[in-house]
Amino acid sequence: MRDIIYFSDSKTVFVLDQTLLPFKVHYVEAKSYKVVIKLIKNLSIRGAPAIGVAGSFAAYLALRGLSRKPKDELLNIVIGRLREIAFARPTAVNLTWSIKKFENILNSNIGKSFKFLSKLFYIEALRIFNEEKKVSLLISRFGSELFSTNNKVLTHCNTGSLATTGPGTALGVIKEANKKNKGLQVFATETRPLLQGSRLTVWECEQNNIDCTLLTDSMASHIIKEKKIDLAIVGADRIAVNGDVANKIGTYQLAIVCKYHKIPFYVAAPLSTFDFECDEGKMIQIEERSSEEVLKIGGKLVSKASKIVNPAFDITPNKLISGIVTEKGIIINPSKKKIIKFKDCCY
Ligand code: MRU
């Protein structure tokens, strides 16, 4: 399979439409930044690092059609478009983080030609793509040290090659651990409402010859106890300076159950997912998505409920987290004192 997002020879963007997986591998051609925004919003491309990369490809496309604009007008239009991209989804910090890089490029090249800016944007988008690939390889290697023979690991949502440009974060760790240790068993939650676990994680595990068992979200505490799960590992969408973690809805309850059963609960994430301007989890905006996603399963209406909540993420407090696996190593018992040291360490 090709990368989940790539530039064609004519520099349009192609995005793997994950809403069709696991039944169809189909790439959508995005000729404008507006199309990429739509693909981010509807979760055709998803997962915090992948959203950051998609945002950067969209930033390049945001310059399209502006070659004849006067330089001052060009600047204002591009700034507006970059803001639009940054707000496509609010919780994963990777999106605003990558867009900030393009704003910085604009600000340090005021008055430069359209052609020059366009080249810089293209180079930066590819750099972010490649760096995210490298860091996900490092995360996978560091995290795999947490595993031993015959381990049973629980994971949530999808955090693999579909969510990054490399092997993944939590699922990348699992893939690497599976290469090193015999008898690894993965337990993957289905991850309602949009089923990133059952549709995507199970598919990725199959492709990597990983023994994977699917469970519904409500089975998790029973399975953790009965199957004697050894550890849980999940990804993150935004990590506050004190180590509180925003991740896919359902993460918090898994962390509580793991704490109760004295099972280590790890988070794997690149430093691009740390928000050094956010002191604690309660400052993180949680994306509220359409009620239709809860009312329907696989596109079919299953409820007539009139009052619905649909937060896409929740916050797991730092005290429930055994460690955060990053490209610079594992931060055990995350705290402000430990995390702040990584402030300027991201690529
Ligand atoms: O709504 P999604 O599918 O974008 O949510 C994804 C998650 O919550 C992942 O766990 C997180 O982004 C980390 S992906 C490496």
Image (tube, helix red, strand yellow):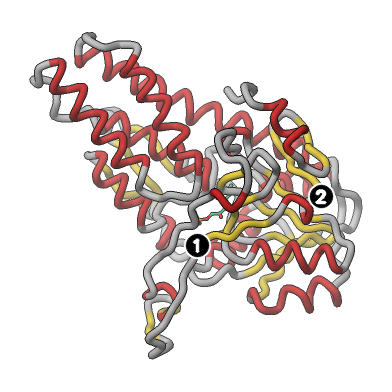
Residue count near mark 1 (Cα–Cα under 10 Å), binned few <14, some 14–19, many ≥20? some
Query: CB of mark 2 within 8 Å of CB of mark 1?
Result: no
The dot on residue 322 is 2
Q: Is residue 2 visible?
A: no
**Quadrant of the drawing holding the C terminus:** top right
Q: Which residue is mark 1?
A: 312
Judged left or right of residue 297, residue 9 is: left
In the image, is residue 274 above or below residue 229?
Answer: above
Position of residue 257 measured from the top left corner of the image (x, y, whole percent): 78, 69
Q: What is the three-letter code of the residue carrying label 2?
A: Ser
Which residue does the image show at 60% across and 37% down from the upper left? 274
Residue 6: quarter of image: top left
| Along the viewing direction, whichever of 37 and 261 lies nearer the viewer | 261
- Which is more N-terminal, label 1 or label 2? 1
Position of residue 18 measured from the top left corner of the image (x, y, whole percent): 43, 56
Which residue does the image show at 65% across and 68% down from the upper left? 189
Which residue does the image show at 63% across and 46% down from the upper left? 280
Number of numbered callouts drawn: 2
Q: Secondary structure at mark 2?
A: loop
In the image, is residue 254 above or below residue 89?
Answer: below
In the image, is residue 96 above or below residue 148?
Answer: above
Mark 1 residue CB less than 8 A from any atom of ligand 1 = yes
Q: Is residue 179 visible?
A: yes
Residue 336: quarter of image: top right
Question: Real-space Cα distance between discs 2 and 1?
Answer: 23 Å
